[in-house]
Amino acid sequence: MKRKTTDTAAASKPKRSKEAIPDYCDVEPCRDEREGIIWPAPEKAMDEAREFLRKCASAHQKTLIVPDKDADGLDAGVIIYRTLTALGLSPSLVDVHLVKKGTNIHDEKERALMQAKDPKFVIVVDQGSRSGPPVVDDPDVQCLIIDHHLSDDFPKNATVVSACHYPPVATSALLTYEICKPLHPDIVSKCGYLCAMGTHGDLGTTLKWKPPFPDMAETFRVHSKKTINDAVSLINAPRRTAKFDVVSAWEALLRAKDPKEILTNKRLLEARAEINEEVERQTHTPPKFSKDGKIAVLRIHSAAQVHPVIATRWAGHLQSKALEIVMVANSGYLPGMVKFSCRIARCARNRDPPVNIISSLKAVADLDTTTDLVQRMGDSFARGHKEASGGIIPVAEFEELMALMKVGEKADPVSGEVAKAKRNTTPQKNNLMNYFAKG
């Protein structure tokens, strides 16, 4: 007896096509009046930065490099170091200042510590983009700021080159590399992998190096992408630990002649193992949503800086039509403070108009009409990039922000809304609640 043929094509549901997410470099760059591309920053600012570095090297005076704590900032700092020494500045005249946990270069204590090192030139990389007094009080000290964080305001009396308004926005390491390349013929061979590390550290390991980004084929021929990406993971680890051991990462980068040397550094390997364990312990926190469904909030308590890692992970997993931003708030990083990181949810990366985290956070804060919440949160609220932002604010102010978002409140029912699906009577064994229960 022949079996009856079933029409499988009719029975099967059509697969939902995945929405294509554009590559980072697939954006229209800014152009000048002659239709020339402005990238990674205006040429005038790039030339001023190069002249500053030439002047610094030829002056043979004490120079202080002040890099941010992550792979992008530290790699940019080492590119500056190697450029200055290649131009003739003695390594004995070059010092580094690494800010302490939970602080920034604008804090009075940090400004005093930088001044105490008695520099004649200060070069700040991957940080510093906000208004304020000069980086140090000595009026004779010359300062250069190389950054890509969104800002139109900078410390007084500084020479500034910023990539923040010129898409695809270059990382600080890439911006620094492009500034330094013409200054000495050895920069490409000695700093290409540093540029790649810093860029992958900020933009991800799957980045496609398309124009106007430079052709890095030779760098990746000499140093595999896997080696570079593994080195990034190790360099980022110490600053995430409760110890905030940034100096170990800086020294490892400075000593290494290539990324392979970094892969065997014992302290970096220990730090990465510590962070991996803490991320696994904290990452199963279930999210709560703002009333409008646009922001998912996960709250953790950890002395380690694992909130950005967890935010990135969850941003790749959570999906809904309303969801735009994933926020991970850490109340254990500094006493009395909440440090939080925000990422655009993967499902929202191709929205039109594009999601802007900084604008969204400020819009929530502006809902406060009875107190001075915005002023009390200060300049450390909603910093960074439109696509990856965060801040550090007092606990009380953070709770006010959560109340304005109406986190945990059910959305108002839509008038005339009808349920479109019934619950499956067969219980699913592999569900989100099982995931939250892990660990």
Image: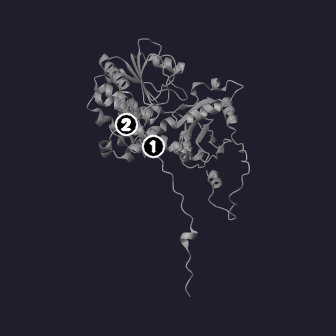
Which residue is labeled 1 in the image?
A: 204
Using the rendered view, name the quadrant where residue 324 is placed: top right
**Mark 1 / mark 2, whichever is N-terminal:** 2
SS type, badge 2: helix
User: Closer to the camera, 352 or 52?
Assistant: 352
Which residue lies at the image location 54% right of the left edge and 21% below the top edge? 107
Q: Is residue 155 above or below residue 70?
A: above
Residue found at the very far bottom of the displayed protein: 1
Which residue is labeled 2 in the image?
A: 195
Across and down, in percent, residue 244 comes to 51, 33
Q: For this view, does 383 lie left or right of residue 219?
A: right
Q: Is residue 37 above or below residue 20?
A: above
What amino acid is found at the position of numbered circle 1 in the picture? Gly
User: Closer to the camera, 201 or 360?
Assistant: 360
Q: Is residue 186 above or below residue 429?
A: above
Label 1: few (<14), some (14–19) or many (≥20) C-alpha neighbours in 10 Å: few
Across and down, in percent, residue 315 comes to 55, 45
Residue found at the very far left of the displayed protein: 185
Q: Circles 1 and 2: CB distance less than 8 Å?
A: no
